[in-house]
Amino acid sequence: MSNLNEALAEAARVLSSASDVTLLGHVHPDADALGSALALGLALRRRGATVRVSFGAPDTVPETLKDLDSAGLLVPASEVPAAPEVLVALDTGSVSRLGPLADRVTTAGAVVVLDHHVSNPGFGTVNVIDPTAEATALVVLRLLDELGAEVDEPVARCVYAGLVTDTRSFRHARASTHLVAARLLEAGVDAEAVARPLMDSHPFGFLGMLARVLSRASLDASAAGGRGFVHAVVTLEDAAGLRPEEVESVVDLVRTTAEAEVAAVVKELSPGRWSVSLRAVRDVDVREVAQLLGGGGHRLASGFTASGSADDVVAALRSALETVAG
Ligand code: MN
């Protein structure tokens, strides 16, 4: 724990003396990645630093996360300097998760890593990695306190967005994290206004897509050592006209299957290229499964990318699942 405190103090020293800071989330950023980057970015901007927040892919900001950027800190990846003065990587468990911006880790003057992935190798010059934190946003909040930054509503909203999503609406939150949530609400966060667009709101077309995708879902109750495995495939055709947010939400329904400890959604990124989301209820470490397939994540939520046919990808996944939980 003292190592973590020392790392926090060192990160605060680096950031408080920096005049230009580039904050990056992982590719296909979620609310924890961008909320964390925007909360810290806002605090640094107020201290007078030049601040930009970005991510390697895709080219557009997820629609549901745009509202968090109250100060206009987000820039396209093409506007990230070739050699940033200070780079901060947030919620990014490995260099490769920075995608096309991964090379900035070698060109930057200093690299601060703020994360909660247990698998993070510590690729920064300063590494604040707390695997006990339910969200990177909690690590950022500790850093904001270390910096003496004001946590008012625009900052608190960004922290809350990361926290409410990564804890699945606080179901995976420790008692102390509920106290953090209370602090954020007292700062003025409107919990429903932040959470509903992130977790509970989709265009009507989502229902038709779900009907098609879920009708093809498949359950193997004997897989994962008899604990059960359910999966669904979302093709580009299924997802046509919908946002990435709709595709990302499919797993939240597939995972409700009572007969399955492990759930997977296989999503087509481009013809023959797939991104797979894995979820476990309690017993199976799906981070281990994802790591066998070149991915990563957390014990109960992980992912990887793969090429081939959907059947190939599912076969490889079943094999890795047998290795870990057979
Ligand atoms: Mn996270």
Image (tube, rainbow, N blue to C red):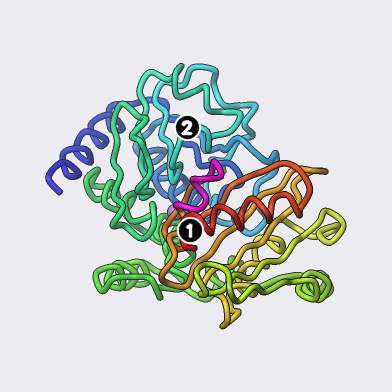
Q: Name the residue beneath numbered marker 2.
A: 95
Magenta segment, which residues? Answer: 288-295
Mark 2 → mark 1, Cα distance in angstroms: 20 Å
Front one among 130 and 319: 319
**Which circle marks residue 265 in the picture?**
none
| Mark 2 or mark 1, whichever is nearer to me | 1
Q: Name the residue beneath numbered marker 1.
A: 286
* 12 versus 107 height, above or below: below
Give ligand 1's quarter of the image.
bottom left
Q: Residue at x 52, y 50 (%)?
A: 290
Image x and y of residue 313, in percent: 69, 50
Neighbour tally class for label 1: few under 14, some 14-19, many 20 plus, Cα within 10 Å: many
Q: Residue at x 85, y 57 (%)?
A: 240
Image x and y of residue 253, in percent: 64, 75
Q: Quadrant of residue 133?
A: bottom left
Does dot 2 land on a helix, a strand or a loop? helix
Residue at far left of view: 2
- Disc 2 residue type (three-letter): Val
- Disc 1 residue type (three-letter): Val
Q: Is residue 14 magenta?
A: no
